[in-house]
Amino acid sequence: MKLRNLVLACALFAPGALLASPAPAPAAATSAPAVATPQQVVENITSELANAIDGHRAELKQDKNKLIGVIDGIFLPHFDIDYASILVLGRHAREATPAQRERFAKAFYDSITHRYAEGLLNYTKGSVKVLPSKGALNDRRTMVRTQVMLDDGKTISVDYAFRKTSDGQWKAYDVVIEGISYITNYRAQVDAEVRKMGIEGLIERLEKNGADTLDKMQKDAAG
């Protein structure tokens, strides 16, 4: 479970969470600020994440709210939570009101965060290798491939899906672990839950029970 949580935590929280802007360089007043590419975003993961955790593991382990706060502060602005939640809802997104979609996005993100946050504390520098990019960037969907090394020496492929938002920023919205999309995986589970209790019922469960609801959804799907 610890290894699985580590992989999922790195996968779900690392992309975009550690976006480090390039050092400013002299430029003409009319020049637009440089925008980090998806590759550059992910390449900053190992050093930035290690710097954020090293020396603070014991403190963060004892104070989960502080750990969640660290994740929210560095990650949330760079993850397209609204777009991801619409994909997770699938066809049910059309049935939901704008307010319900907004509540679902927040409740789902909070549930994921609380479930896998502690896995980040097992992260060590050098455990993620960013692979060379292939082809030109595509504004609608660009993949960044990485390999995550586990404690036993095995490696797992983790790919990050990015899209360019209307303001020109690259944001992560999906993670593919060993060929399995986090969006696709949760979409099937969410679909089953909505069929049973409706969108409002699922949102209320996520808001009230968070990570426990995700655990039950996965157990039901497996059983």
Image: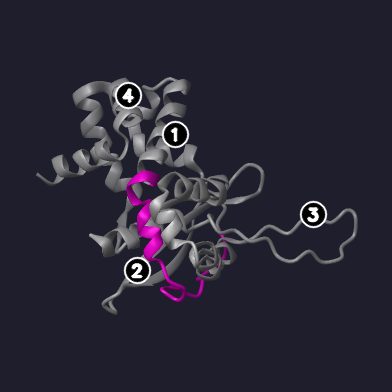
Q: Nearer the viewer, mark 2 or mark 1?
A: 1
Which residue in the structure is indicated by mark 4? 204
- Amino acid tagged 3: Ala
What is the distance, in whole Å, between disc 3 and disc 1 at their CAs? 32 Å
Provide the secondary structure element on which disc 3 rests: loop
Which residue in the structure is indicated by mark 2? 157
Locate residue 122, reporting x and y percent. 37, 65
- Amino acid tagged 4: Glu
Magenta stretch: includes residue 129: yes
Residue at position x 43%, y 20% in the image: 97
Provide the secondary structure element on which disc 2 rests: strand
Q: Which mark is residue 106?
A: 1
What is the distance, in whole Å, between disc 3 and disc 2 at their CAs? 35 Å
Quadrant for the C terminus, please: top left
Which residue in the structure is indicated by mark 3? 32
Provide the secondary structure element on which disc 4 rests: helix
Mark 2, Cα crowd under 10 Å, few <14 / some 14-19 / many 20+, is some
Q: Which mark is residue 90?
A: none
What is the distance, in whole Å, between disc 2 and disc 1 at their CAs? 28 Å
Locate residue 35, reporting x and y percent. 68, 57
